[in-house]
Image: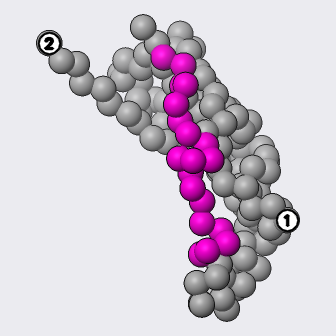
């Protein structure tokens, strides 16, 4: 007998840096009031889903979002750094427009080569905790 497994992929709630138009990456900024509200509304919309586990990155904004979605449900929440966002180095905390403008000026493909990620090689998602 086979069982179906359904994944729900949900982006973190809106943050202060989102509101300010700043690049976030691994940088943390708090959820805004609307970000918290959106996460809670997502939890209400998914109230009938029988979650057995939840996974988030190690970033506080994603943990907070997941906790607001889960509410009081007795569901384990696991963090895994393989789910973390890309690190933008010195770009983090700068206005998104600076990065976008620089990227548009660099049409030769160099940007793609220097920012390309080998996600599976760098951050494999093996060894995720499982729930029996």
> Which residue is painted at 46% across and 12% down in the image?
131
Looking at the image, is mark 2 or mark 1 earlier in the sequence? 2
Vertical side of 91 occupied by 99: above or below: below
Q: Quadrant of the C terminus?
A: top left
| Category of crowding for the residue at label 1, using alpha-carbon neighbours closer than 10 angstroms: few (below 14), some (14–19), many (at least 20) | few
Vertical side of 127 occupied by 16: above or below: below
Provide residue 46's location: percent of width, then percent of height: 40, 29
39 falls in the magenta region? no
Quickly name the residue at label 2. Answer: 1
> Which residue is painted at 24% across and 24% down in the image?
4
127 falls in the magenta region? yes
Quickly name the residue at label 1. Answer: 90
Residue 124: quadrant of the picture: top right
Q: Quadrant of the N terminus?
A: top left
Q: Is residue 46 left or right of residue 77?
A: left
Provide residue 97's location: percent of width, then percent of height: 72, 78
Give the total number of marks visible in the rendering: 2
Residue 130 visible in image: yes
> Which residue is painted at 59% across and 21% down in the image?
77
The magenta stretch spans which residues? 112-130
Contact flag, marks 2 and 1 (Cβ < 8 Å): no
């Amino acid at each position: 007998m086979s069982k179906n497994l359904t994944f729900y992929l949900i982006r973190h709630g809106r943050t202060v840096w989102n509101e300010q138009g700043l690049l976030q990456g691994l940088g943390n900024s708090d959820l805004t009031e609307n970000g918290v509200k959106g996460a809670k509304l997502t939890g209400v919309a998914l109230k009938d889903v029988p979650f057995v586990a939840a996974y988030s990155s190690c970033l506080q904004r994603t943990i907070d979002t997941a906790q607001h979605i889960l509410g009081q449900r007795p569901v384990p929440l696991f963090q895994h750094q393989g789910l973390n966002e890309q690190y933008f180095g010195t770009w983090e905390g700068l206005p998104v427009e600076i990065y976008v403008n620089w990227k548009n000026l660099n049409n030769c493909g160099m940007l793609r080569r220097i920012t390309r990620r080998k996600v599976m090689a760098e951050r494999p998602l093996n060894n995720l905790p499982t729930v029996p």
